[in-house]
């Protein structure tokens, strides 16, 4: 099954990283208000050890259920890519918030650290 069989993938890029981009998506036939982050990782040219490590990471991610960790909903593999469908978190990046306020109080820093440590 292909990711596009189950999800509409928007051209809207939510983020990008070393291995690929993360796009906004919605489930076909589902609520258009329920958003997903769909990460596309280049898989074709990866070494066997890298593929094994990524597969182990996906298995761990699928087994996790924690309120402070983004939930992995579905995984699809094509000939060239691995697609990870995750719940869409729209709170933004902590680093961007710190840059915006220019000063991050000790209380805010302690709260942010506490939330990270809980996960």
Image (cartoon, rainbow, N blue to C red):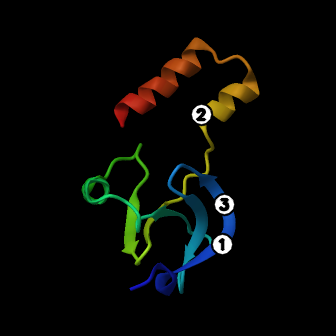
Q: Secondary structure at mark 1?
A: strand
Q: Position of residue 5 (x, y in %)?
A: 48, 87
Return the residue at label 2.
94
Residue 52 appears in which quarter of the rendering? bottom left
Residue 56 appears in which quarter of the rendering? bottom left
In which quadrant is the N terminus drawn? bottom left
Q: CA distance from mark 2 to mark 3?
A: 18 Å
Label 2 packing within 10 angstroms: few (<14), some (14-19), many (20+): few
Label 1 packing within 10 angstroms: few (<14), some (14-19), many (20+): few
In which quadrant is the C terminus drawn? top left
Please say if the residues under marks 3 and 1 sit with CB atoms less than 8 Å apart: no
Q: Residue at x 61, y 65 (%)?
A: 24
Q: Nearer the viewer, mark 2 or mark 3?
A: 3
Residue 104 appears in which quarter of the rendering? top right
Q: Relative to residue 32, is residue 71 drawn left or right?
A: left
Q: Secondary structure at mark 2?
A: helix
Q: Position of residue 70 (x, y in %)?
A: 43, 51
Q: CA distance from mark 1 to mark 2?
A: 25 Å
Q: CA distance from mark 3 to mark 1?
A: 8 Å
In the rendered view, would you say 44 is above or below 94? below
Return the residue at label 3.
13
Return the residue at label 1.
10
Q: Position of residue 54 (x, y in %)?
A: 32, 56
In the rendered view, would you say 30 is above or below 19? below
Q: Residue at x 49, y 18 (%)?
A: 110
Q: Secondary structure at mark 3?
A: strand
């Amino acid at each position: 099954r292909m990711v596009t069989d189950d999800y509409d993938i928007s051209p809207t890029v939510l983020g990008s990283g070393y291995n690929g981009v993360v796009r906004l998506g919605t489930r076909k036939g589902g609520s258009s208000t329920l958003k997903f982050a769909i990460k596309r990782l280049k898989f074709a040219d990866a070494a066997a050890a890298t593929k094994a490590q990524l597969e182990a990471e996906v298995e761990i991610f699928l087994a996790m259920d924690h309120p402070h960790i983004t939930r992995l909903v579905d995984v699809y593999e094509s000939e060239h890519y691995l697609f990870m469908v995750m719940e869409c978190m729209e709170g933004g990046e902590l680093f961007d918030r710190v840059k915006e306020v220019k000063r991050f109080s000790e209380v805010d820093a302690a709260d942010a650290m506490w939330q990270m440590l809980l996960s």
